[in-house]
Image: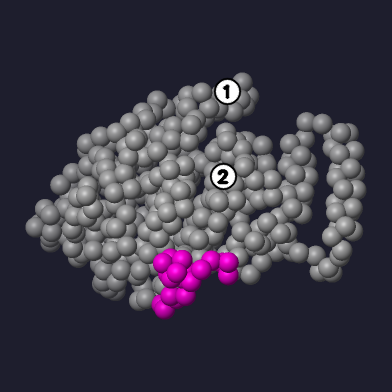
Amino acid sequence: MNGGPSQVDLFDPKPLLNRYHGQPYLNKLEVADVQDPEFAGALMGSPFKFAQHGQSGVWLSELLPHLEKQVDDIAFIRSMHTTTPDHGGACFKINSGHMFSGYPSLGSWVTYGLGSESQNLPAYVVLQDISPPVNGSQGWQPGFLPPIYQGTPLRSTGSPLLNLRPEVKEPTEFTKAGQDLLKKLDLIHKNKRTGQPRLDARIASYELAARMQLAATDALDLSKENQTTLNMYGVGESSPFRGRTHPIDGPDNYARRCIMARRLIERGVRFVQIYINTQIWDMHTHIENDMRAACKKTDQPIAALIYDLKQRGLLDDTLLIWNGEFGRLPITQFHKQRVGPGRDHNPHAFTLWMAGGGVKGGTVYGSTDEFGYRAVENRVSVPDWHATVLHLLGLHHEEFFFTRGGLKEKLTSTSEPKIIDDIIA
């Protein structure tokens, strides 16, 4: 959910923010938190109603009518905080533990540690939106890990990969004989050039591409899903909703990718990352309209994914993560034309949630101050969260490293993170 979803409009209700709506607060913010003071205003209460749901009584915004049915399987962390209000740096931070490019992404670390259960599909798959996410393909790079751990972007419409199938159809035996010969030639070439991880990765990628010709097409073929499942996710619902500068499409595109993620997990893919258009959540203006549109696009597919994984017996050993890179400020932000108000970036407080994979459902961990500006109780840093994710996957953040230049490089870097035991079942 790159773009910065607003925690106080979705997961973290603040009655006092509504009570003091319109009161000045700008002088209490850090100077660096306000991009353009000329268009920064007073406190802005959420225009959306909150209610408690499930046996756990978790509070959720009215914008999430589908997710509310799944709250008893979800652990919410309301006290997340990060180190920068910049989209690029914050996306790098939560994805790799560093604010800069060149470091392995979380998916690369996980596949390095756990490998793959599939020989015919990549271990780490990326399902992009129509437009690329913040940082583009740098978001799924392996950094200093061997190149084989790079994420593989698959297209959600048409052929999963360009040039996946040959232009001329050949007999299967002929194709296999050609692949066997090529494998022998590659091995001869490789044996003369030892210690070349890029060469090894390139050869492995070509071999995987050959095996993927059938496996990838089958994994992403939604025609094999029954209509009940398609309807549950929202496939086919593509009517646009009013957006800030352009219409935001309905759940269809996102729903398709959520189903594809489940189908990939079923087939042994280790790590699937679903990106969304950054502008969907980056609501500097028109937050009331755009927040409704963003939730219309994402709420139904995400809730369906939790339910679908659970009914198929996959949720217990599949960790589902919903996160942005930071939250939003409790004050208004206007455009120079004084269009509908929005909220600016806030690195001091945001909410993310996890389901399945050993988390304790129906829990809420940590809290922010009375206006949702800062995480104050049981604060969780990005390294803390990374350590917890690794723990849930059976990896210890201190013992899981890659030796480079005599240093033990870790996802959690040189920090001393804490595992959030209270959200672990």
Which mark identifies residue 407? 1
Is residue 181 in sight in this rendering?
A: yes
User: SS at mark 2?
Assistant: loop
User: SS at mark 1?
Assistant: strand
Residue at 22% in and 47% down: 56
Q: Is 138 included in the stretch rendered in magenta?
A: no
Q: Nearer the viewer, residue 93 or 356?
A: 356
Horizontal placement of 399 versus 421: left or right? right
Q: Who comes first in sequence, dot 2 or dot 1?
A: 2
Q: Verify CB contact (< 8 Å) between mark 2 and mark 1.
A: no
Is residue 349 in sight in this rendering?
A: no
Look at the picture and state if 148 lies above or below 167: above
Q: Is 226 included in the stretch rendered in magenta?
A: yes
Q: Which residue is mark 2?
A: 270
Give the magenta-colored segment's residue range.
222-240
- Measuring from the top left, give residue 218's x and y in whole percent: 64, 61
Screen quadrant of the N terminus = bottom left
- Measuring from the top left, give residue 11's x and y in whole percent: 26, 53
Residue at 32% in and 54% down: 70
In this rendering, which labeled residue sits more in front, label 2 or label 1? 2
